[in-house]
Amino acid sequence: MTSADRLLTTENLHGKLYDADSMLDVKRSVAAGYVVLLNGGPASAAPNSNAEGEDENLPLAFMSLTSGNVIDTCFGVVNPSMRGDTPARRSARAAKELLDENDTTDSFRQIAVTAYCEAFKVIMNYNDQMDKLNCFAKCFKSKAIRNETEEKIRAVFDSLVVAMGNSS
């Protein structure tokens, strides 16, 4: 595999794990709920110091990614229980299958859960920043805040993309 192939694979994996536009549409309260689900508690500034609590929560958190609606939200699927085949549903299903295929170790599960949890924390911060802007400031600053948030989301998923690349 050449370096260009690896780059292409990396680019493809980011697009298969989430949709940036859909994630930016997630409301703060929804993102906070997913952080609680994936983190085992509310978002905090300091990383979890309770490693045992993390291990207890890991199977449930990873299952919420592969079997729950966390990834559906990352692709903009509004009602996952409704029947129908849309591009968003297909993308969410493919992302879940991709995570399932690479689910070989607890460390991979932890990387996946951490990536999605951190992404939702970035979304919470994005919503906070946008809520602070007045109408005039939104016209000029929203694009920059949006671009910065997209870069942060991409950076959060880098470790998961690397882990997936290493497992294949």
Image: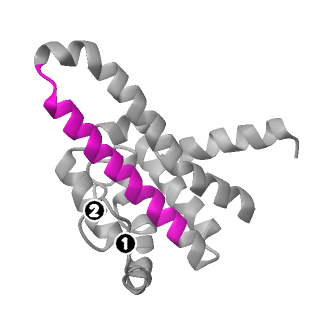
**Image location of residue 97, percent across then percent down:** 56, 62
Q: Do the residues labelled 2 and 1 touch (CB within 8 Å)?
A: yes
Judge the density around disc 2: few (<14), some (14-19), many (≥20) Cα neighbours within 10 Å.
few
The residue positioned 33% from the left and 27% from the top of the image is: 145
> With 104 as the anchor, is 53 left or right in this view?
left
- Magenta stretch? 110-134
Q: Which of 47 and 69 is in front in this view?
A: 47
User: What amino acid is found at the position of numbered circle 2 in the picture?
Assistant: Ser
Determine the residue positioned at 26% across, 66% down: 36
Please state if 46 lies on the left or on the right of 130 as rendered: right
The residue labelled by disc 1 is 48
Quarter occupied by the C terminus: bottom right
Residue 15's image quarter? top right
Q: What kind of secondary structure does the magenta stretch mostly adopt?
A: helix
Percent coordinates x, y for residue 96 in the rendering: 50, 60
Which amino acid, by three-letter code, is at mark 1? Answer: Asn
Establish if 123 lies above or below 146.
below
Tell me, yes or no, whether the highlighted magenta stretch contains residue 114. Answer: yes
Left/right placement of residue 17 relative to residue 67 reads right
Q: Does residue 123 lie above or below 65 as drawn?
A: above
- Pointer 2 residue: 44
